[in-house]
Image (cartoon, coloured by chain):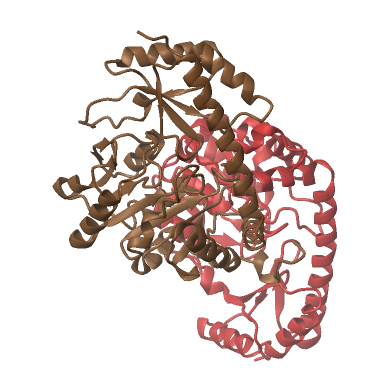
Chain colours: A red, B brown
Amino acid sequence: MTAAPHDAFAPGDPRGRPELRRALTDYLARTRGVRTGPDRIVICSGFGHALRLLFPAVLPGPLAVESYGLAFHRQLLTAAGIHTAPLPLDEHGARTAELASLDDVRAALLTPAHQFPTGVPLHPDRRTAAVNWARTSGSYLIEDDYDGEFRYDRKPVGALQGLDPERIIHIGSVSKSLSPAVRLGWMVLPARLVDPVLAAKGEREAWASVTDQLTLADFLTHGSYDRHVRRMRQRYRRRRDRLIEAVHAHAPHLRLSGIAAGLHAVLQLPDGATASDERTALRAARWQGLALDGLSDYRHPDATMPPRHGLVVGYATPTESAFPAALEALCRALPPAA
Amino acid sequence: MTAAPHDAFAPGDPRGRPELRRALTDYLARTRGVRTGPDRIVICSGFGHALRLLFPAVLPGPLAVESYGLAFHRQLLTAAGIHTAPLPLDEHGARTAELASLDDVRAALLTPAHQFPTGVPLHPDRRTAAVNWARTSGSYLIEDDYDGEFRYDRKPVGALQGLDPERIIHIGSVSKSLSPAVRLGWMVLPARLVDPVLAAKGEREAWASVTDQLTLADFLTHGSYDRHVRRMRQRYRRRRDRLIEAVHAHAPHLRLSGIAAGLHAVLQLPDGATASDERTALRAARWQGLALDGLSDYRHPDATMPPRHGLVVGYATPTESAFPAALEALCRALPPAA
């Protein structure tokens, strides 16, 4: 507060504080391979706010989305009058080659680093196919980089945005790295979309707290954010390793997927499992006091791909002291071998 | 941060943090005569956000507004598809007896404590007339209490909301008391409007920073906010007194109005002044490096009342050290006697 310039507390640039946009430019280039500049970053209050700014004011519908994804995002788009068309998924991520067959679609929302919730990274060929579709059809890709900073095993998966900054809208936030209660996110925009997004935002409504913006800028610039992410990545990796060990020991018939990154994994039910089996497993978890979701909760209502059944296990939320008990409860709830 | 409960950093109640809603309940009752409870307060990011939540999702148009007011609010309403109907003003404030003659209008937006920008408080008879209209027609009053805390001379003008909490939506923010860069405001709602407003807000988008919310709650609860407002009120009163003295000494033919409260006064041009005279006076101010507005900038395009001409002089913005020079510049720019 004492170091903040006097003008920081007047109504400011609707893009957000320049200190934060400069710090994000450096940080995203270094950690995610994002190619941008401070003038093409717009600060917002999170991913939902970014979607509200884009649709319908900046981009028209319909919008391609992944067949499994957050219902909250689909509902927000529906409320904005935007039709969503589901893209099938497989073990390589979204089948982006099928984008061209979706009628009238001029934008696609993807989670390339770690498909949410199934957990696979988008295959390099699929990334190329998505970018080529956007270029040839004059469409936009919206990259939801919700947990790109938390990768454990393999070498980093860079942001899709680096492949074509004029066709890809990259959106991130501190919801996973710090807290969803800190309402701070960012949109990295193609040059021609900056003015339309600012018009949708409104000159006078900056939305995001300037004190939070200046704090995050400082946190980024002085390396504290990097240290925090590194520390949390180690902590989450340990939790993930313990989850893998526990499942292997108590239910070797079950497979965990999506474990290379992120704050959740999917406990896949055996082949042939049904929606009813998933509901039974969720009920068993609830009995143990665990709030898990089933994959069915994330399925797009119009999806045509074969259904998948499994439990989405988030392992970041419990406090460090509560985690062992939560893991034991999960082991008691695991579905037995058929 | 260290005192905040663990759940504060998870997605929370879309109404906002309970600590802040409890603190505001006490504070608004004590200082503004607002009658409410924590469950009927919804935290938002400022007045503009409140209007966006209300229109068109919760209240239909058309909406009565004062003939002079913020163009930003009118534009925001127009963008939301809401027609605004101007209510005439006189030396007693908005002519609320005329609300009944406005076709189809089911809500009115008022600045009762200190009309913006002309500066008069709404006369007690006009307050009663507005509330009676709302009751008999089943309409709502929206009270923009933008600077209710900064009253200098007379005894406090309580919030209109105390007259009928079921018909009046009271909206305040910290934009004048702390900074517009702290994106925090509050809506005090009639019971039956709470759920519709929360539905418009969306379960997952709390918008306002939780760290800012907890900080303000603490600030209010421990009396620091009261001390800050008291200190700033003294500072602004001194500035206002110096402004009155300066105008009296340099331009005794000009009258300052709206000086009993707030962070601005209106320097009225002499009777018979025209829009052209106002533009000339504004140009002279600009030559002196002053960014003033003319009353014409605030006039509703459909207003039928006789036009008023004058300069809106905000005296809160300059730093304490820059204020004397700003006041001297104003004196050099004052229009000469005819």
Q: Is residue B89 left or right of residue B189?
A: left
**Picture mark count:** 0
Residue B328: image location, x then y, percent? 58, 16
- In the foreground, A109 or B96: B96
Residue A11: image location, x then y, percent? 56, 36
Residue A298 visible? The answer is yes
Q: Is residue B108 left or right of residue A144?
A: left
- In the foreground, B19 or A178: B19
* Quarter placement of the C terminus of chain A: bottom right
Residue A92: image location, x then y, percent? 65, 58
Res B254 → quadrant: top left
Res B75 → quadrant: top left
* Quarter placement of the N terminus of chain A: top right
Residue visible at 82% across and 79% down? A245
Res A13 → quadrant: top right
Q: Is residue A86 left or right of residue A19?
A: left
Q: Establish if B305 lies above or below B188.
A: above
Q: Establish if B18 lies above or below A78.
A: below
